[in-house]
Image: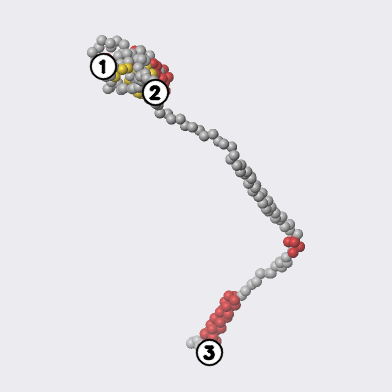
Amino acid sequence: MELKKNPKADVGKNSSLYFVIGLAAVLGLVYGAMEWKKYDKSNDYDISMNVEDQLDEEVPMTEQIKTPPPPPPPAAPEVIEVVEDEEEVEETVIESTETSQEEEVMEVEEVEVEEVEEDISVPFAVIEDVPVFPGCEGSSNKKQCFQDMMQKHIRKNFRYPEIAQEMGVQGRVNVIFVIQKDGSIGNIRMRGPDKNLEKEALRIIQRLPKMTPGKQRGRAVKVPFSIPITFKLQ
């Protein structure tokens, strides 16, 4: 048996119309949602100005600037009295200093001019007669003998400071001294790595004996001399 469709029961008959109506409704809802505006509740604010509070404010006192008093007028100049020169002034007579032929001329004795000894200092390397160390009087080479005796004196009087040994301090102390015109030792200066080593070097030089002074052109002069003293731990 063949089934037949009822034309009145056709579901898709007006589907296009329903689609248009639905689309229009949706567009209307979307447009209404986009144009929807919502306002906050307005609060009442007191915007009135309290004029009395402003009028009650204290006005700051302005400082009055006092103008300084005008300076006093300048004092009137003293009246100078002009006195007439009635008194006679004695004139000063200048006598001539020229001698006449009648006056006797006194003879002047010769004036002796004392020679001032110059404090000359001549280096040890260039002096004519070097200072003589005690014991070198009969040596033919007094300069070499002087240096040998200096080394002998240092070795004889050398003592390594105990405090320097404990601290492990060593080095070379350069000593400069001057053999004066009377043969004494003076003006001792030294420089080294430690004060204790410098103090020991000073003690050694101070024990030097008095020497025969050096001479330049037959006159005794000061002779500076320098020597290094080495302190080395074993």
Image coloring type: secondary structure
Query: What residue is disc 1 on?
Result: 144
Q: Position of residue 150 (x, y in %)?
A: 31, 16
Q: Residue 37: tell me if it is visible.
A: yes
Towards the viewer: 125 or 57: 125
Disc 3 and disc 2 in contact, CB within 8 angstroms? no
How far is the residue under mark 3 from the one under mark 2?
A: 190 Å
Callout 3 amino acid: Pro
Element on which disc 1 rests: helix
Q: Position of residue 28 (x, y in %)?
A: 58, 80
Query: What residue is disc 2 on?
Result: 102
Q: Position of residue 49 (x, y in %)?
A: 73, 65
Q: Residue at x 48, y 87 (%)?
A: 2
Towards the viewer: 165 or 136: 136
Q: Residue at x 59, y 76 (%)?
A: 35
* Number of the label disc, if any, that sits on residue 7: 3
How many residues crowd around disc 2 within 10 Å: few (fewer than 14), some, or many (20 or more)?
few
Towards the viewer: 12 or 27: 27
Q: Residue at x 64, y 72 (%)?
A: 38
Callout 1 amino acid: Gln
In primary-sequence order, the first of circles 3 and 2 is: 3
Element on which disc 2 rests: loop
